[in-house]
Amino acid sequence: MDYILEGLKEGINLLLTFNKEVYGIIFLSLFVSITATIISSFIFIPLGVYLGIKDFVGKKIFSRILYTLMSIPSVVVGLIVAIIISRRGPLGSLQLLYTPWAMIIAQTLLIIPLGLGLTYNLSKNRGKNIEKIGLTLGAGKRDIIILIISELKRDLFINVVTVFSRAISEVGAVMIVGGNIKGHTRVITTSIAMFNSMGNYPMAIALGLVLLFISFTINSLIYKE
């Protein structure tokens, strides 16, 4: 029990003294996850709204496939991205493997299905009524999508926050494409796993506390009541 309390004390001290390594890991994690969330949001919000209100052949099958992809294992995404951007892969010439940009690509591909599924379901259930109002006012398809996004902006914001929480807490994909390189691609989750295996509990606890704080902040934004 004593070593746990001592580790917690040292972990808090690392945060309060602004340990360079700890904060470097935190800032990289936030950069990667926020960038991935922004990129994916520009894709899944308009696409999810459009697909939700549009009737097309095979929509039920599409829904099942999409909902399945929402829970796709992160290591599978990491493996696919690693193969594509590896030296012998189709995008190997870009030399993206083991860089923060590889991690951003992996996280973006990981969270797009989640955001798309949430937005698609939201639009399918509530977008039709808004679409009818837009058509009554003479709005075009593009205007209707903008109108739905405007009317459902609070729910869409929750979707964005949800995919960010998925990104910031992800381990497998970023470990595979990033390599957990010190000072370069080491993020919160991969660092916690590594420091725990090394027995460096103060560092692991410090980063764990940061992850808990981020989780608390995210839930505070979603559940204000």
Image (cartoon, rainbow, N blue to C red):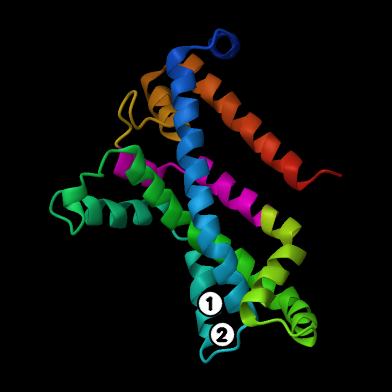
Q: Is residue 81 left or right of residue 189?
A: left
Task: Answer whether residue 216 is magenta in the image.
Answer: no
The outermost residue toward the front is 138
Kindly report the secondary structure that dominates the magenta region of the rendered protein. Answer: helix
Q: Quadrant of the N terminus?
A: top right
Which residue bears the numbered disc 2?
Answer: 60
Which is nearer the eye, 192 or 140?
140
Which residue bears the numbered disc 1?
Answer: 64
Q: Quadrant of the C terminus?
A: top right
Count of numbered badges drawn on the protein: 2
Res 176 visible: no
Of the numbered discs in the image, which one, if any, rests on residue 158? none
Residue at (64% x, 48% y) in the render:
161
Q: Please tell me whether mark 2 sits on a helix, a strand or a loop.
A: helix
Task: Answer whether residue 173 is magenta in the image.
Answer: yes
Residue 194 location, quadrant? top left
**Mark 2 Cα within 10 Å, few/some/many (few <14, many 20+)?**
few
Q: Please tell me whether mark 1 sits on a helix, a strand or a loop.
A: helix
Residue at (71% x, 81% y) in the render:
139
Q: Is residue 201 above or below residue 134?
A: above
Which is nearer the eye, 203 or 146?
146
**Percent position of residue 40, x then y:** 50, 56
Residue type at numbered disc 1: Arg
Residue 205 location, quadrant? top right
Span colored in magenta: 158-178
Residue type at numbered disc 2: Lys
The answer to whether mark 2 and mark 1 are in CB contact below 8 A is: yes
Residue at (51% x, 80% y) in the render:
62
Q: Is residue 67 above or below residue 155?
A: below
Res 150 visible: yes
